[in-house]
Image: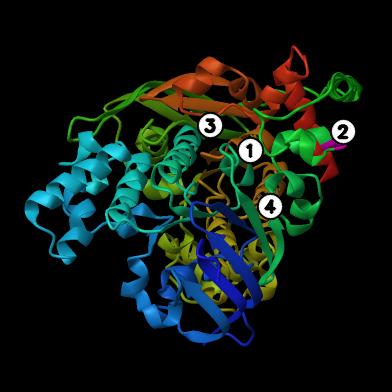
């Protein structure tokens, strides 16, 4: 066997004990020392199962039957066990909070060293070295839950790096990060890989974001099998991603719409290395000029208004500083900004979960401070990011009926409204199912249905597509768009710049408790100053427009989105 190979799957298959069919079939995959590999694919394709086989969670936490052979560090992975594999493979989980053990950042990083009975002096030195490498020296004495989302991920990474592992495995590292922090995370992973020489495996469906830095190979999975194993450049020249239900980088889709024939030597996987001839740039300009200008939206009457809203938490954190926001009837808009910018506090103030010290909130001209939380909920629905935190009943029908029954609505009326809502949400055929039998995306629909049945005028959704692959993301967003067309005002709190561009004509940008912009989504993402201040990320369409000499990147973005929606 090649000494450089650190992970080797040979004709490997796996079937969970609780499932009737295997999740993995005939996996043949080698990963070498120092290699950086992206494993991508839609939800349920088997990429997480591969990760669990590599880090030992299969079979330690998820029992089942394996066939074929899996060798890690030259040894049989199943014989090494969870502890043995932890010396070779370090895993950084999607949810960093679920990985913390210590009371301080320093304690958390030192956990593995304490387990190995390393001397205090050596431990202190080792923790300082690793903390410097991942840039968390300044927060060593903070509690892990006090640091930002990006810092949490760095702490998790430091905690597995102290073991001097050969493989670093990142499970959806971008899922809970704002755009700028996600970009920094990809830069950090690249830097660590170059510094340590570890093999790096990134499991992620946000291909464009991961390709911000080069990867050696992309492994694309579908229905438990490897569909592609090769360069990102070659993959992007094909239609493999579209067929798999994975979003291509936006600039790649735009080039294909313009009729540009992509080849590997053009380096389509890297926006900075992308090589376009003058005639290809002209093709893009011609395509842009042929696209009709999307019509301007008509201004509807005002539904909701926030005037000079101010709120400070008991500990002294000044979260909202004079917030002025107007929302019109039937609008669909995004609220964006970095973690801690005030977005969630604003939504809590709107729903009545926190009471502002000053300012005014009105809905249809009614002062919301005169209404209780329950009374506000009759008009404004709030859908949390994690559906499991909202669901309290075992059956789908009962979950959707819960709010109506709480309000004392007659059972005949409850049945009529619940069934009607389930039909709108595409859940009617599941009405007698237990909630536990549903996928994450279907549970999300149940939580939306449980709010929708109360017939609110406005729905606030916190990160509605977090952790969803492109197909499920599109299902949820198309569904919300249908609700919006029926007259329901939809407000989305999101980190997803693609979502903001595609589905919400308007974006309100929060930064440090202030509203720093209230413009069209295309204007926001084509303004480098707003992007930098609010920790957003310029769309790749902006860079493509500039490369091709189109002086109106904002209009290029608008026309692309209109065309993309038409095609899909």
Residue 95 falls left or right of residue 113 = right
Of the 4 image quadrants, the one containing the N terminus is bottom right
> Of marks 4 and 3, which one's residue comes earlier in the chain?
3
Is residue 422 covered in magenta? Answer: no
Outermost residue to the top: 551
* Viewer-nearest residue: 417 or 123: 123
For discs 4 and 3, the disc positioned in front in the rendered view: 4
Please tell me whether mark 4 sits on a helix, a strand or a loop: helix
Can you tell which quarter of the image residue 432 is in? bottom right
Residue tagged by mark 4? 479
* Viewer-nearest residue: 454 or 263: 263
Marks 1/3: CA–CA distance: 31 Å
Please tell me whether mark 2 sits on a helix, a strand or a loop: loop
**Residue at 58% in and 17% down:** 527
Q: Are marks 1 and 3 in contact (CB under 8 Å)?
A: no
Residue 514 falls left or right of residue 144 = right
For discs 4 and 1, the disc positioned in front in the rendered view: 1
Please tell me whether mark 3 sits on a helix, a strand or a loop: loop
Give coordinates of residue 94: x percent, y percent. 44, 55
Please tell me whether mark 1 sits on a helix, a strand or a loop: helix
Around disc 2, counting alpha carbons within 10 Å, would you say few (fewer than 14), some (14 to 19), or many (20 or more)?
some
Q: Is residue 69 above or below residue 450?
A: below
> Of marks 4 and 2, which one's residue comes earlier in the chain?
2
Q: Are marks 4 and 2 in contact (CB under 8 Å)?
A: no
Residue tagged by mark 2? 260
Marks 4/1: CA–CA distance: 17 Å
| Circle number at residue 364 | 3
Around disc 4, counting alpha carbons within 10 Å, would you say few (fewer than 14), some (14 to 19), or many (20 or more)?
some
């Amino acid at each position: 066997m090649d000494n450089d190979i650190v992970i080797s799957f040979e004709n490997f298959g796996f079937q969970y004990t609780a499932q009737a069919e295997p999740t993995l079939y005939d996996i043949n995959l080698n990963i070498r020392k120092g290699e950086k590999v992206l494993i991508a694919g839609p939800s349920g394709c088997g990429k997480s199962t591969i990760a669990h086989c590599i880090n030992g969670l299969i079979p330690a936490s998820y029992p089942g039957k394996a066939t074929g052979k899996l060798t890690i560090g030259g040894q049989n992975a199943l014989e090494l066990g969870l502890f043995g594999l932890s010396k070779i493979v370090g895993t950084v989980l999607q949810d960093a909070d679920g990985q913390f053990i210590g009371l301080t950042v320093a304690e958390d990083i030192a956990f593995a060293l304490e387990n190995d009975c390393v001397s205090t002096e050596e431990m202190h030195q080792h923790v300082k070295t690793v903390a410097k490498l991942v840039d968390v020296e300044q927060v060593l004495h903070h509690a892990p839950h006090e640091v930002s989302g990006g810092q949490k991920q760095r702490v998790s990474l430091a905690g597995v790096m102290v073991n001097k592992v050969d493989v670093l495995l990142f499970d959806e590292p971008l899922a809970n990060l704002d755009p700028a922090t996600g970009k920094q995370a990809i830069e950090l992973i690249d830097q660590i890989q170059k510094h340590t020489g570890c093999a790096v495996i990134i499991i992620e469906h946000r291909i464009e974001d991961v390709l911000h830095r080069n990867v050696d190979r992309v492994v694309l999975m579908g229905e438990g099998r490897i569909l592609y194993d090769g360069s990102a450049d070659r993959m992007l020249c094909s239609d493999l991603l579209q067929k798999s239900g994975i979003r291509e980088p936006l600039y790649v889709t735009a080039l294909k719409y313009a009729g540009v024939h992509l080849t590997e030597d053009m380096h389509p996987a890297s926006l900075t290395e992308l090589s376009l001839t003058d005639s290809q740039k002209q093709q893009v300009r011609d395509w842009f000029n042929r696209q009709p200008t999307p019509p301007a939206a008509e201004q509807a009457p005002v539904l909701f208004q926030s005037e000079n809203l101010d709120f400070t938490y008991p500990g002294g954190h000044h979260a909202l500083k004079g917030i002025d926001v107007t929302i019109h009837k039937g609008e669909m808009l995004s609220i964006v900004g970095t973690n801690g910018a005030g977005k969630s506090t604003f939504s809590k103030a709107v729903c009545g979960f926190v009471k502002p010290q000053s300012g005014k909130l009105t809905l249809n001209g009614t002062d919301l401070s005169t209404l209780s939380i329950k009374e506000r909920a009759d008009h404004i629905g709030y859908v949390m990011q994690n559906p499991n935190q909202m669901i309290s009943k075992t059956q789908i029908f009962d979950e959707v009926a819960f709010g109506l029954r709480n309000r004392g609505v007659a059972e005949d009326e409850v049945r009529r409204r619940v069934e009607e809502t389930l039909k709108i949400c595409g859940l009617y055929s599941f009405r007698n199912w237990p909630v536990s039998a549903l996928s994450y995306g279907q549970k999300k629909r149940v939580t939306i249905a449980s709010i929708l049945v109360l017939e609110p005028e406005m729905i606030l959704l916190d990160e509605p597509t977090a952790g969803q692959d492109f197909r499920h993301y599109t299902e949820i967003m198309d569904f919300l768009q249908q609700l919006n067309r029926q007259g329901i005002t939809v407000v989305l709190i999101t980190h997803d710049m693609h979502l903001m561009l595609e589905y919400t004509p308007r974006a309100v940008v929060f930064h440090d408790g202030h509203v720093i912009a209230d413009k069209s989504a295309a204007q926001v993402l084509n303004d480098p100053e707003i992007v930098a201040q609010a920790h957003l990320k310029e769309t790749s369409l902006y860079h493509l427009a500039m490369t091709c000499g189109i002086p109106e990147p904002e209009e290029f973005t608008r026309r692309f989105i209109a065309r993309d929606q038409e095609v899909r």
